[in-house]
Amino acid sequence: MSSHFDCRDETQLLPGLREARRAVARGELVVLPTDTVYGVGADAFNAAAVQRLLDAKGRGRQSPPPVLVPNTETLHALAADVPEPVRLLVDEFWPGGLTIVLPAQPSLTWDLGETHGTVAVRMPDHRIALELLAETGPLAVSSANLTGRSAAVLVDEAHGMLRDSVAVYLDGGPSATGIASTIVDATSFVGGEAPVIRVLREGAIDRARLREVLGDMLEADPVEADGGDA
């Protein structure tokens, strides 16, 4: 049976965070609000918990979840290297809706799925998420929905899809934007011959804003095909 806490009520916030922390420690799943959409999270260093997350969503190991972190120091602990362009992005957009893919520290003992030696990292801009992350450490977090369904922007939407596969639901009210994070791939800056930041998914932060920070270190914008006569 799942536990629900309305974290907009200060009397429920601390008990909710405490129960969520305990659930993560037990290898169970929690739903938490973020600045983009609701996420379902698990201990990133517990392989069974990460598999439970993938199973709850109906998602395969070929789609590993990103990792949410409480601060930039944790990024340096998880990534093999943090090149200058990534530091620029972090300074400008973290905490916020930008997920960055980098080579993972080879010494890390975790199993997020078929990552091919990379890790996708984000620091969310949400008080409840950051407070939970400060207590649990890095969490593997994916959008709180079944694969193929729209991401949840309300905790009730998440519960309607994930039900009792999740131990604790933290309600932070409606998502601020409902727009998923932008995902960029910076792996070519670590040992790549022609390094460039690639946009894997455009979301909360558009290419124009990325270009303002990165200039030519961002891949060329896609050319729109001519649709022909109407």
Image (cartoon, grey):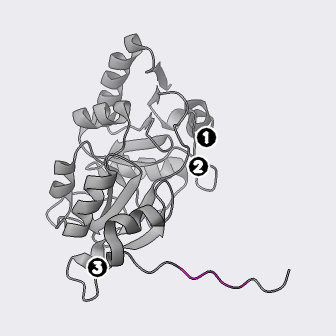
Q: Quadrant of residue 62?
A: bottom left
Q: Which residue is mark 2?
A: 146
As for residue 79 lying within the magenta part, the answer is: no
The image shows a total of numbered marks equal to 3
Mark 3–mark 2 distance (CA, rounded to whole Å): 32 Å
Label 3 residue SS: helix
Q: Sort mark 2 into few (<14), some (14-19) or many (20+) by Cα contacts within 10 Å.
A: some
* Residue 63 visible in the shown view: no
Mark 1–mark 3 distance (CA, rounded to whole Å): 37 Å
In this rendering, the label closer to the viewer, 3 or 2: 3
Q: Residue furthest top?
A: 11
Q: Residue at x 29, y 31 (%)?
A: 131
Q: Sort mark 3 into few (<14), some (14-19) or many (20+) by Cα contacts within 10 Å.
A: some
Label 1 residue SS: helix
Q: Residue at x 28, y 48 (%)?
A: 46
Nearer to me, 89 or 182:
89
Q: Which residue is mark 1?
A: 161
Q: Residue furthest bottom?
A: 193
Q: Amino acid at mark 1?
A: Met
Q: Please, what is the dominant secondary structure of the magenta stretch? A: loop
The answer to whether 230 is drawn above or below residue 124 in the figure is below
Q: Amino acid at mark 3?
A: Ser
Q: Residue at x 63, y 56 (%)?
A: 148
Q: Amino acid at mark 2?
A: Leu
Q: Quadrant of residue 225?
A: bottom right
Tag 2 or tag 3, which sits nearer the N-term? 2
Extent of the magenta region:
222-226
Which label was assigned to residue 188? 3
Location of residue 78 in the rendering, given as x and y in whole percent from the top left corner: 20, 57
